[in-house]
Image (cartoon, helix red, strand yellow):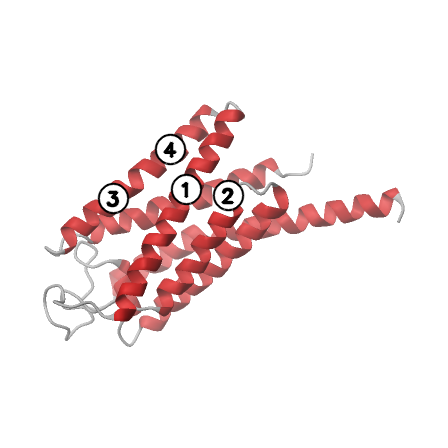
């Protein structure tokens, strides 16, 4: 193999990696955008009361199932792109994608009148599939938090203080929103903090993807 062929292979590999990282740019806006459209159009759903995971239920639940699934696959593709570029946090990003798909496959229990016709209030018991859904949800949030610290350390080493601070802020702010949402869920007011968790994690992943795309541009 001559030098020219080797150079073309390297360039082709970098091009593929950048395309895979583009999946991360798309994943966050797709997930939040599709969730909000459903939240605002599905009968009986309230952003202040219900977690967006409840959109997996009901006759139109397949839309949110597809949203979770596609976003999870895009995140896994993003993780592969990260691995090909620099490895930093790629396994954690991949775990996020896998657990998002797992959360879609294990649906939560109906709560606070959603889907319409369900009993009001939180259920007195939790089903097995709802427990698995919660575990997958906590796992994917922890994966993003851990990835935030990985990138914060990396950005500090590169003397990119603003980027490092953003990563730390996301890592510290996300569990605050999570515990607030959990605490308020029993009273039917946990929807917005839990939406904040989804927005914070999705925005961070997309922002990192944009940064990696910029850093990997041909010069």
Q: Is residue 182 above or below residue 50?
A: above
The one nearer the camera, 124 or 197, is: 124
Classify 10 Å Cα crowding around label 3: few (below 14), some (14-19), many (20 and above). many
Residue 69 quadrant: bottom left
Secondary structure of residue under mark 1: helix
Classify 10 Å Cα crowding around label 4: few (below 14), some (14-19), many (20 and above). some
Q: Are marks 3 and 1 in contact (CB under 8 Å)?
A: no
Which residue in the structure is indicated by mark 2? 89
Q: Is residue 203 left or right of residue 218?
A: left
Which residue in the structure is indicated by mark 4? 168
Q: CA distance from mark 1 to mark 2?
A: 8 Å
Q: Is residue 138 left or right of residue 114?
A: right
Could you tell me if residue 148 is visible in this image? yes
Q: CA distance from mark 3 to mark 1?
A: 16 Å
Classify 10 Å Cα crowding around label 1: few (below 14), some (14-19), many (20 and above). some
Q: Which mark is residue 177?
A: 3
Q: CA distance from mark 4 to mark 3?
A: 14 Å
Q: Which comes before the other along the chain, label 1 or label 4?
A: 1
Residue 5 percent across, percent down from the top left: 85, 48
Which residue in the structure is indicated by mark 1? 146
Residue name at image x 10 percent, y 64 percent = 121
Residue 218 quadrant: top right
Q: Which mark is residue 208?
A: none
Q: CA distance from mark 2 to mark 3?
A: 23 Å
Q: CA distance from mark 1 to mark 4?
A: 10 Å
Could you tell me if residue 38 is visible in this image? no
Residue 31 percent across, percent down from the top left: 39, 56
Residue name at image x 20 percent, y 51 percent = 182
Q: Are marks 2 and 3 in contact (CB under 8 Å)?
A: no
Q: Which comes before the other along the chain, label 2 or label 4?
A: 2
Residue name at image x 32 percent, y 58 percent = 135
Q: Is residue 163 left or right of residue 130?
A: right
């Amino acid at each position: 193999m001559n030098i020219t062929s080797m150079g073309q292979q390297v360039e082709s590999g970098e091009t593929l990696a950048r395309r895979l990282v583009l999946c991360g740019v798309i994943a966050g806006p797709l997930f939040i955008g599709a969730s909000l459209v459903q939240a605002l159009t599905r009968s009986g759903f309230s952003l202040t009361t219900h977690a967006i995971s409840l959109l997996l239920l009901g006759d139109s639940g397949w839309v949110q199932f597809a949203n979770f699934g596609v976003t999870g696959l895009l995140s896994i593709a993003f993780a592969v792109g990260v691995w090909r570029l620099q490895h930093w946090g790629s396994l954690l990003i991949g775990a996020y994608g896998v657990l998002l798909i797992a959360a879609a496959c294990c649906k939560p229990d109906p709560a606070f009148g959603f889907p319409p016709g369900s009993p009001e209030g939180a259920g007195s018991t939790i089903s097995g599939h709802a427990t698995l859904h919660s575990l997958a949800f906590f796992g994917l949030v922890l994966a993003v938090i851990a990835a935030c610290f990985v990138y914060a350390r990396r950005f500090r080493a590169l003397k990119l203080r603003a980027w490092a601070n953003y990563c730390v802020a996301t890592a510290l702010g996300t569990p605050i929103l999570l515990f607030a949402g959990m605490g308020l869920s029993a009273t039917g007011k946990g929807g917005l903090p839990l939406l904040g968790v989804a927005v914070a994690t999705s925005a961070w992943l997309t922002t990192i993807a944009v940064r990696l795309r910029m850093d990997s541009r041909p010069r």
